[in-house]
Amino acid sequence: MPQCLICSVENLPNVSRCASCGAMLRQAVEAANGMFDFEEGRRYQAPTETFDTENLAQLRMAIDDWLDGADDAQVRVWLKHIRKHFEEFTGHGMAQLARALEVEKRLNSEGEFHHQVGYLVRKGVALCEEGLHGMETSLPAEDEHELQKYLDVFRQGNDHICTALQMISDRQEMLNEAVERFAPEAEEATSAPDGLA
C-alpha cells in the first residue's frame, strides 16, 4: 500500500494520486520522471527567464488580497485551477513531450537539447508539486510565510517547465525555417533536366 509522503495516508496500489490530499504518489512522480533523461554529474542550465503566466498572476493577486484581509476563497479557487492544469500536464503533456524528445534523441543522440529539456521538465515538475502541496497545506494553517515561500517554489517550477516548452518551440521554428530555406534547393536538385522527362 503506497503511503503518501505529504499526509501519510495509505493508498490503493496502482493509483497515481493520494485519495486524501491529492498529492502525486512517489511511484507516479518516479514514473513521470523516468520518461526523461537525467544524468548524474552532467551540468544543466537553470532557467534565466521568469514566466509570469496568467494563472500564476491570478493566484498571486488572490494571495495578496488574502494577506490584506480578504477571505481565502479566491486563493482556493486558483489553487484548484492550477492543480487541475498541473495534473493535465503530468498526465498527458509530459507523455507527449517524452515522445517528441525520444525522436529528437534518435536524430541527434550526441546533442544536448534532449538532455537539457528533460532536466528542465523533471526539475520543474518536482518543484511545482512541492510548491502546490506547500501552498495547499499552509493555506488552511493560515501560515503566510510558508504560503509565500511555496508560491515562489511553484513559480520556479513553472519557470523550468516554461523554459523547456520555449526551447521546444524555438527548435520547431528553427527546423521549419531550415526546411523552407532548403526545400526549393532540394526540389531543384531532384527535378529532371529539360528534355529528359
Image: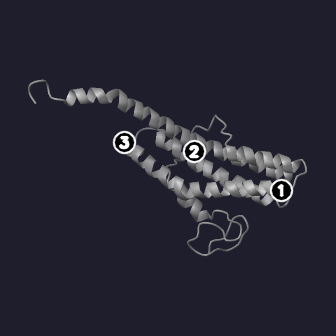
Which badge, 1 or 3, comes first in the chain's sequence? 1
117 horizontally vs 149: left or right: left
Identified by mark 1, the residue type is Asp
Q: CA distance from mark 1 to mark 2?
A: 32 Å
The dot on residue 120 is: 2
Q: Residue furthest left?
A: 196
Determine whether, in the image, residue 117 is placed left or right of residue 137: left
Q: Nearer the viewer, residue 70 or 124?
A: 70
The mark nearer the N terminus, 3 or 2, is 3
For label 3, count other residues whose C-alpha is less than 10 Å away and answer few (under 14), some (14-19) or many (20+). Answer: few
Of circles 1 and 3, which is in front? Answer: 1
Q: Position of residue 54 (x, y in %)?
A: 68, 44
The kind of residue on which mark 2 rests is Leu
Residue 134 visible in this rendered orientation of the protein? no
Q: Nearer the viewer, residue 196 or 8?
A: 196
Task: State the separation of the CA atoms marked 3 and 2.
Answer: 20 Å
* Residues under numbered marks 1 and 3 in contact, where contact means CB atoms less than 8 Å apart: no
Task: Tell me the element at label 3.
Answer: helix
Left or right of residue 26: residue 6 = right
Please give the residue where the numbered disc 1 appears in the rendered image: 72
Q: Going by the image, does 3 lie left or right of 27?
A: right
